[in-house]
């Protein structure tokens, strides 16, 4: 089957992860693999945060090689694509499903799932889920060859390395954020997080630390707590307490967020997509996992730590484990900080090995290969 068109459906539940992953995948399929991609999204305001040139008032627009469409309640009558992807199990419009069922050649239908490092993922990856007369296939991102891998643009690691070896690019980045490039002895930390009661302890630890810390906080859910920490202090260019300086940054477009991760020594990330980007940055990071009601996120967190820990030196593992635990539990992250900071050398090495190790397992490529397999399998069955 020759895949020329693709429809991606994205229902924004909350935050930016659903649209973040969908938008990244859409761009890659269009720009690296030449598919005509339509991205259907039910919340264009969220999309516009990641892609600032987007107009949230337009039902249809072309952005970065992708046709971006508002997913309305009353779904329009459109031609079904060769490849249909529902992001994170969102329910497709019934009229579109009906059109899929009667298409001469049924589309390949993929349910792109959430990312998890847990073992069960390997057993569920690529499983069919019959929806007669159609079949939907589960596609799981993951960290092993028996999973779908991770989203990775073909040139991302090369762009990262070019950025890291080019002072001019770095300077341009800092200037675009309204700052001079900080000197090398300052520890630079980006902080993208949900509300978190552990922030005070962490800020205290940074304020009291021997090394100067520059913390960059993109606008978002943790900002009220940052303001509260500094109380009545006027922000001016930034907030300062002891050896800690905090700067609030605008939410940058998705492609530029990588630069922020590359420019920092340590990155605090959350959810799913920023966590993956922090891994590609090849730098130590701290992950605030998306909390789930039934607390299953703890297993997910530990599963990741187990895999990631295998690339680290023996002393770095408990240091990382402890800070991640405290940060996610809103506990005493300040206390866990110093052990983590002492292991930065090991954590850096491990992060680089990890990124290199994962880079041969490219999600988009795997997804297209799998879709091709399904297409071929079907043709075989029909012909036979
Ligand atoms: O926004 P999130 O918390 O999204 C979450 C998770 O994806 C979670 O798994 C999901 O269930 C829930 O939403 C509904 O975190 P995430 O996944 O990191 O998405 C943030 C996106 O925002 C990511 O694509 C990076 C991008 N981003 C920017 O483009 N600019 C910025 O300045 C920042 C801070 C982030």
Image (tube, rainbow, N blue to C red):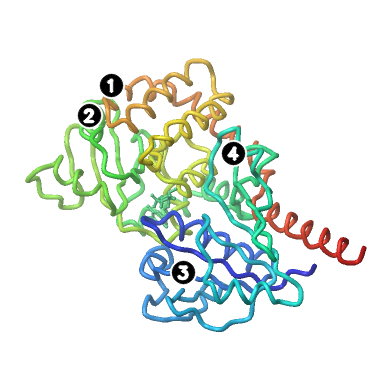
Q: Nearer the viewer, residue 168 or 336?
A: 336
Question: In the image, which is nearer the foreground, mark 3 or mark 1?
Answer: 3
Q: CA distance from mark 4 to mark 1?
A: 28 Å
Q: CA distance from mark 2 to mark 3?
A: 39 Å
Q: Which mark is residue 163?
A: none
Q: Earlier in the sequence, mark 2 or mark 1?
A: 2
Q: Are marks 2 and 1 in contact (CB under 8 Å)?
A: yes
Q: Which residue is mark 3?
A: 41
Q: Is mark 4 within 8 Å of ligand 1?
A: no
Q: Secondary structure at mark 2?
A: helix
Q: Nearer the viewer, residue 349 or 31?
A: 31
Q: Quadrant of the N terminus?
A: bottom right
Q: Earlier in the sequence, mark 4 or mark 3?
A: 3
Query: Which residue does the image show at 23% across and 40% down from the upper left?
Result: 245
Q: Quadrant of the C terminus?
A: bottom right
Q: Which residue is mark 1?
A: 335
- Residue farthest along the bottom direction in this orientation: 77
Q: Which residue is mark 4?
A: 355
Instruction: Answer left or right for 186 relative to 354.
Output: left
Give the crowd class for mark 1: few <14, some 14-19, many >=20 residues within 10 Å.
some
Instruction: Answer left or right for 181 relative to 96.
Output: left
Q: CA distance from mark 2 to mark 1?
A: 8 Å
């Amino acid at each position: 089957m020759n895949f020329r068109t693709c429809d991606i459906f994205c229902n924004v539940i909350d935050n930016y992860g659903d649209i973040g992953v969908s938008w990244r995948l859409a761009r890659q399929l269009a720009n690296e693999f030449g598919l005509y991609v339509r991205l259907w999204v039910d919340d264009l305001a969220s999309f516009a945060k990641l892609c600032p040139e987007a107009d949230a008032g337009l039902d249809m627009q072309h952005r970065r090689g992708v046709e971006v469409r508002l997913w309305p309640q009353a779904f329009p009558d459109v031609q079904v694509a060769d490849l249909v992807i529902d992001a994170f199990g969102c329910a497709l419009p019934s009229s579109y499903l009906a059109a899929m069922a009667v298409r001469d050649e049924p589309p390949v239908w993929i349910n792109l799932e959430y990312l998890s490092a847990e073992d069960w993922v390997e057993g569920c990856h690529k499983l069919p889920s019959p929806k007669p007369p159609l079949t939907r296939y589960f596609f799981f991102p993951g960290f092993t060859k028996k999973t779908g891998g991770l989203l990775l643009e073909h040139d991302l690691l090369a762009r990262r390395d070019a950025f890291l070896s080019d002072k001019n690019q770095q300077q341009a980045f800092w200037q675009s954020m309204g700052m001079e490039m900080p000197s090398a002895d300052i520890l630079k930390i980006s902080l993208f997080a949900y509300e978190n009661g552990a922030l005070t302890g962490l800020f205290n630890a940074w304020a009291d630390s021997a090394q100067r810390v520059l913390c960059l906080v993109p606008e978002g859910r943790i900002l009220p707590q940052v303001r509260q920490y500094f109380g009545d202090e006027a922000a001016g260019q930034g907030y300062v307490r002891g050896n800690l300086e905090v700067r609030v940054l605008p939410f940058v477009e998705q492609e530029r967020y990588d630069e922020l991760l590359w420019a920092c020594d340590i990155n605090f990330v959350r959810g799913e997509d920023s966590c993956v980007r922090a891994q590609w940055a090849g730098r130590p990071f701290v992950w605030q996992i998306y909390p789930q009601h039934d607390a299953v996120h703890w297993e997910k967190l530990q599963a990741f730590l187990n895999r990631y820990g295998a690339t680290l030196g023996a002393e770095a593992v408990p240091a990382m484990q402890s800070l991640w635990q405290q940060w996610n539990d809103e506990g005493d992250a300040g206390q866990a900080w110093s052990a983590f900071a002492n292991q930065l050398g090991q954590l850096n090495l491990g992060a680089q090995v990890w990124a290199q190790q994962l880079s041969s397992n490219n999600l988009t490529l795997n997804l297209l290969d799998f879709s091709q397999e399904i297409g071929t399998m079907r043709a075989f069955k029909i012909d036979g």
